[in-house]
Amino acid sequence: MTRQWAGLVAVSVSILVLLLVPQEFFLAATFGSTLTMLGASRLAGGLRTRARVRVRHLIIGLVSAGALYAIFFAGAFAIREFRPFGIDQAAESGIYSLIASPSNPLTLQLAALFVDAAGFESYFRGVVQKKLEPRLGVLAIPAAALLDASLHLAAFYRYGGAASLWAATTFVADAGWGLTFYFSKSTFASFTSHLTWDVVIFILEPIM
């Protein structure tokens, strides 16, 4: 239990650092934060380095990524058309450009997205959601998503109103990966979904 609480504190602090550092250090902080998540997952027993890869989990992950992309595509359209709460597409573009910037080499972007998917899925699904499921059942999905999204509100200090959009999109994406994990019982499925979604939305077909 002590290790689990220590891991939660370390992960929370690493996310806050990630969101509060100057933008030029965001990519480096991404590696630091996600590696912290991998370490915390390892200590808590949520990181399975020899897990068996199943084709079914790969397919589930790809379908999940496609569904999430469709949801975010519709959300981006709504933001462009209706500007809810005064939020415009510039706020959304600013978030994506933190990684998908011309100043960042493609290999570095891909590496960051890989560790991002591995870190978040191993910790927030493989540790947090998995620990909550015996008590909360399906409600463990929004509980884990809310934890991650609430930490992202700290971005308000540096990114202003874009932080509310960041937190909202984090909750939606986390809920999607939480559902993927809940029904597949596989962090490989949620990792596949997360990584595929990241690569498509940041590099291949940005929606901004």
Image (tube, rainbow, N blue to C red):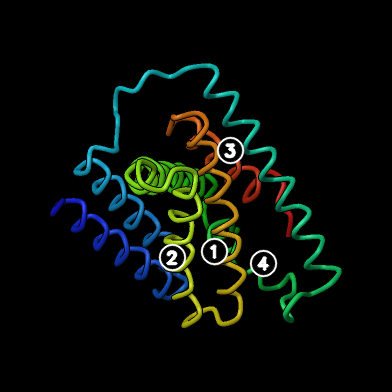
- The structure residue drawn at horizontal position 63% and vertical position 38%, both measured from the top left corner, is 65
- The structure residue drawn at horizontal position 46% and vertical position 68%, both measured from the top left corner, is 150
Q: CA distance from mark 1 to mark 4?
A: 11 Å
Q: Is residue 197 above or below residue 173?
A: above
Q: Is residue 180 above or below residue 168?
A: above
Q: Earlier in the sequence, mark 3 or mark 2?
A: 2
| Place of residue 95 in the rendered image (x, y in percent of width and height, measured from the top left) | 59, 66
Disc 4 + disc 3, Cβ < 8 Å:
no
Residue to which mark 4 is pinned: 92
Which quadrant of the figure contains the C terminus?
bottom right
- Give the residue type at disc 3: Thr
Q: Nearer the viewer, residue 121 or 138?
A: 138
Q: CA distance from mark 3 to mark 2?
A: 21 Å
Q: Is residue 78 left or right of residue 163?
A: right
| Place of residue 8 in the rendered image (x, y in percent of width and height, measured from the top left) | 27, 58
Q: Residues within 10 Å of mark 1 (few under 14, many from 20)?
A: some
- Provide the secondary structure element on which disc 2 rests: helix
- Give the residue type at disc 1: Leu
Q: Is residue 30 left or right of residue 48?
A: right
Quadrant of the rendered image containing residue 101: bottom right
Disc 1 + disc 4, Cβ < 8 Å:
no
- Provide the secondary structure element on which disc 1 rests: loop
Q: Earlier in the sequence, mark 1 or mark 4?
A: 4
- Provide the secondary structure element on which disc 3 rests: helix
Residue to which mark 2 is pinned: 26
Mark linked to residue 196: 3
